[in-house]
Amino acid sequence: MTTKLCLGLMVILTFTLLLVSCKGSTPTPGASTVQPSVSATPTATTPVSTSTTKPPTTTPSSLGTATRDPAKYGGVWKTTLTVGPSTPLGYIPEAANDSMDLARPALEPMFNIQRDRTLVPKLATSWDIDAQAATITFHLRKGVKFHDGSDFNASVVKWCWDLIVAAKKAPNIKSIDVVDDYTIRVNFKTYQNTDFYSFSGGYYLVYSKFSFDKYGIDYTRTHPIGTGPFKFVEYQRDSKLVYTRNENYWEPGVPYLDGLEYYVVAEETVRKLLLERGDVHMIRASVTIQPEMIKKGFPYLTEPGGTWLLVPDSANPDSPFSNIKVRQAVSYAIDREALAEGLGFGFMKPAYYLYPGNPLCALPEGQYLKTEYNPAKAKQLLAEAGYPNGFKTSIHTFVRVVNRDFVTAIAKMLGDVGIKCDANFPEAGKYEEYRSKGWNNALLAHAFISLSQSAHNLDSMYFPESNIIFPSVKRPERFYELIKIAKSTPEVDPAKVQALYKCIADDFMVIPYVEESVYNFYVKGAHDEGGKRYFLTAFYPWEAWLEPSVR
Amino acid sequence: MHTYIIRRLFQILLVLLLVSIVVFLMVRILPGDPILLYMTQQNMEILNKEQIDVIRHDLGLDRNLAVQYVDWLSHALRGDLGKSIISRSDVSDEIARRLPITMYLSGIAFIISIIIGIPLGVISAVRRGSWLDNVLTSIGNLGITVPAFWLGILLIYLFGMKLNWLPIFGFTSPFVDFGMSIKQTILPVICLAVPPIATDIRMTRSSILEVMRQDYIRTAWSKGLKERFVIIRHALKNGLIPVVTMKGMGLAHIVGGSVIVETVFSITGMGRLAVEGLFSQDYTIVQGVMLVTGAVVLLVNLLVDLSYAWLDPRIRYS
């Protein structure tokens, strides 16, 4: 009887599974429904509007044809990544910042921005910005081919950027017009000077429509086919990313390297050992190994990085942090010098406001309240705020963003003035929940990455007006107004940007404590010329070269 | 025997079904929203509720849970485990690429642990109380307590850095470059094999000692049989039954332990895929990995159960 029952259940189960497996096919979740527009003909007939503002300072591509040292040619540059690109590499509407940076050897933007704010033309040879008409017109480089042999022209650029608009990733773009084969005009809803700098990379990297049409979206996701100095070879997820030299690159004489190889190595000790063995030519080092690498004499490049800070739930009226005096007290309670020296090993700098290392945001002494370590002052402020005996709170952080030791140290410092903190280290999902849905009576320990030229783009990066990120942070009264003002000038006006950052500092909207430094270490004989001029957050390989001894 | 195997296979199907339901639900209960995790890697200016809803709909995550599950299951039965939420890559392809690597390393570690661990356990039992027993027992205790992460870094430092004998990261298929594959496999396999070797030594020792006390073993000794004959012919088979049971479970531990080893040695295996999928709450990755891993473990356990019949002729399956 039992046997018959079992057999019967097995038959029913098998039948059910067969029925389910034969269910009509439905779109597989994950398949993108964004389809490219088919239009390939120019649509604009109006002449290019006269520029009413001078374009930002430009320089011709610094790599002229005059002198190319033959000794520089050869070798495959090898470097490491902590994690592989998390999102599609080649299909930009679905790509995140890390993927876009890693696709740069193959995909090019209109221009590059050097650290000194000089612009280097790439796929655009020149541009006209019309702030009144809210347009930017790019004059494209002629004679450029994609890696698949198809032509680079305005139609392809329009196709690429139309996809971005369709994916709602460029909310300020009204339309894009092809003026002629090598002229394209972007029409904005309102003029924002940050929009221009967006064309130095990110969503505006250009890739081949021909390959997309021929091979489809899935292929494009994993194959960045562009115009860059390197051609994509392969990507093995979480393993390695390989490029090879583009022999037909439009700029004569470059690149010097035969290829690039990125290896995904999660463990920092292993990355360090790889550099010491000479298995790789470059690594990005965290603060924990920076002193050792410098002591060992490895050449390096450095630049100011992001700011580590505490984000209070000031929008919550029941929270102690809604009182500015409490936020000031927290700031006074933190010994930034000790953190920078002790836990940053001297490679971090105290930060009293956001992005102190960015000239655009630099606030002169006296222009902001510099809350140097003063526990007595902190206690006084707490008493004035109605917390003479302090209060209990929490600090939440995701350890991949902020080093756990810093949070523990800060919790101790706050405890010394009466703010008793529980330091919590939730996983990514829970931390993201705090960040997007809000947190109560707590501080988030976060890190804001450096924004370089777009320091006033805070509403795009961290505090959107939709409040969908950091909703628990009360925006100062003039916050969005100051952002709009800073974005509205034809060129970026440092005074306007500083006004925004002063507003943030005065309100203690966030409480920075250290500024990290980005360090890239190299083996002797590996020359990252691009790293000397461009930001280190991305690798600009077309100027890199290897001495024969390290090839 | 055939009936038993068929019945067990159906049980495996049922267990896998239950596992898939549990994993499906649990991964959605976890705090956090994968769409937000995905979106916050992008520029925030596009972050509004409407855009998030579009992405959620695009991925099919706004449907009823039961509908989502049935849809996923129907595709899974046809070999389509869906697409990663974050990277949009095909989950089946990812698993197909990584599973052989993990099974290759785990399999070698498993075999090595049997070849080394069981004989050493037998020796330790037979030479109980001697210096050899003490050494092997100590090795067993050490192997159990040493963390795989620490051992991996130590091996990298010693063999990769100081002696420069072996590569310290990556994996090459033996069909592509056999020599490099062997070199790259040595250190990770050592890390994977040490804990089960240690466990095998202790378990085998304990099991053999138990068997050696049996009457039929005393009879064998009193008949004047040679020691080797008594151990191998009489004691070993019976003593191996609990060891085999443990080895069946041990394979699951080896596969699980591969997470740490794969991270340390930067090997693209299933373990890392599972961890990355879990951290980024990539539902489809986690579901796919758990389904495949579960199937492997269950099939191995079936083989373990079937091996009992070979070890002990009294055991018969009907």
Image (spheres, rainbow, N blue to C red):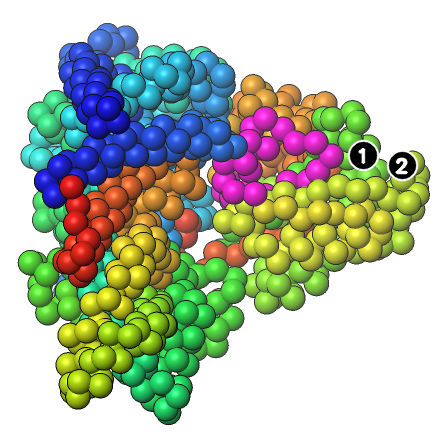
Q: Amino acid at mark 1?
A: Pro
Let me know if residue A274 appears in the view. Answer: no
| Residue A446 magenta | yes
Front of the two marks 2 and 1: 1
Front residue of A36/B277: it is: B277
- What is the C-alpha distance between the residues marked 2 and 1? 8 Å
> In the image, A539: left or right of B105?
right
Q: Which residue is mark 2?
A: A385
Say which chain tag 1 marks: A
User: Which residue is depicted at the point 72% across and 23% down?
Assistant: A477
| Residue A85 magenta | no
> In the image, B290: left or right of A243?
right
Assign a secondary structure to mark 1.
helix
Residue B316: x and y in percent read: 16, 49
Residue B150: x and y in percent read: 42, 69
Q: Which residue is mark 1?
A: A320
User: Which residue is depicted at the point 15% across and 68% down?
Assistant: B182
Assign a secondary structure to mark 2.
loop
Front residue of A56/A386: it is: A386
Q: Magenta segment range?
A: A426-452
Query: In the picture shown, does residue A370 fall above or below A14?
Result: below
CB contact under 8 Å: marks 2 and 1: yes
- Residue furthest bottom as drawn: B131
Front residue of B80/B50: it is: B80
User: Which residue is depicted at the point 41% across and 69% down?
Assistant: B144
Give the number of callouts: 2
Q: Quadrant of residue B230?
A: bottom left
Residue A496: x and y in percent read: 62, 31
Q: Quadrant of residue B240?
A: bottom left
Residue B290: x and y in percent read: 31, 39
